[in-house]
Image: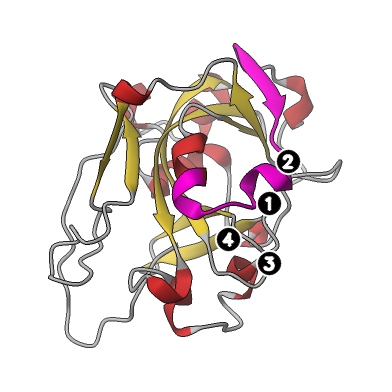
Amino acid sequence: MGDHPDRGALIAPARGRRLTAGDLARDPLEVARSLLGTYLVGRGVTLRLTEVEAYHGEVDPGSHGYRGVTPRTRVMFGPAGHLYVYRSYGIHWCCNIVCGTKGECAAVLVRAGEVVAGQDVVADRRPDVVTRDRARGPGRLTRAMAIDGEDNGAPLTGAAAPFVLYAPSERVPDPLVRTGPRVGVSGPGGDGTAFPWRYWIDGEPSVSVYRPGKPRKGERAGRG
């Protein structure tokens, strides 16, 4: 990954302070809400987050950590302020921000964002995708940011962090925040409505299309 432009060369518009591990060491639903409008900066690209999903371990059948710690999910159990990256259905990478307290399985899936700096870099990585869709959905987002399995466990704080988060200069107003079932996660009842843990900014073109989960026999629980 060393051939990508340095994250320090980018300046996100209207950004505030850099987020710390302490900002993320909270309930995943609170963190998910707070991440809307934040800037994810790294590898030549600045992304304004417009859609996320919360996952909460042992109380959440939709989480990879629902059944406890495994070699795959260990990073999800903290500490906060790291990335949990996994391959979805063997097709594309998904990126989660680990939150909560150490020992608690909590993460927020970064689903979509608006590219606000580094558009030319993203265009080189995704020449086949129109501008609106370049970070619309978790797989497109990771390709836009050049995130892959080697970034699993990477820190979001400290000088060596490949990616950093910046708060917006102003919090996204509550009337613009929408919540609903997570994309592709069925959960109890079969329709996902028991866990309305998807958060997005109303009216943002980069927000992905909602698709309900379709439980399959023998399917393992979880994504984030």
Q: In the structure shown, which secondary structural element does the residue marked by tag 2 occupy?
A: loop
Residue type at the position of mark 3: Lys
Q: Secondary structure at mark 4?
A: strand
The residue to which callout 4 is attached is 84
In this rendering, does residue 142 appear at all?
Answer: no
Quadrant location of residue 128?
Answer: top left
Q: Is tag 3's residue or tag 1's residue first in the polypeptide sequence?
A: 1
User: Do the numbered discs 1 and 2 sit on residues whose CB atoms are within 8 Å?
Assistant: yes
Q: Secondary structure at mark 1?
A: loop
Q: Which residue is mark 2?
A: 20
Instruction: Say what amino acid the circle numbered 1 marks.
Output: Gly
Callout 1: 10 Å neighbours few (<14), some, many (20+)?
A: many
Q: Residue at left 52%, top 58%? A: 107
Q: Nearer the viewer, mark 3 or mark 1?
A: 3
The x and y percentages for residue 106 are 53, 62
Q: x, y percentage for residue 94?
A: 46, 55
Q: Is residue 165 left or right of residue 175?
A: right
Which is nearer the N-term, disc 1 or disc 2?
Answer: 2
Q: Answer whether residue 15 is magenta in the image.
A: yes
Please give the residue where the numbered disc 3 appears in the rendered image: 102
Type of amino acid under label 4: Tyr
Q: Residue at x 59, y 55 (%)?
A: 99
Q: Residues within 10 Å of mark 3 (few under 14, many from 20)?
A: some
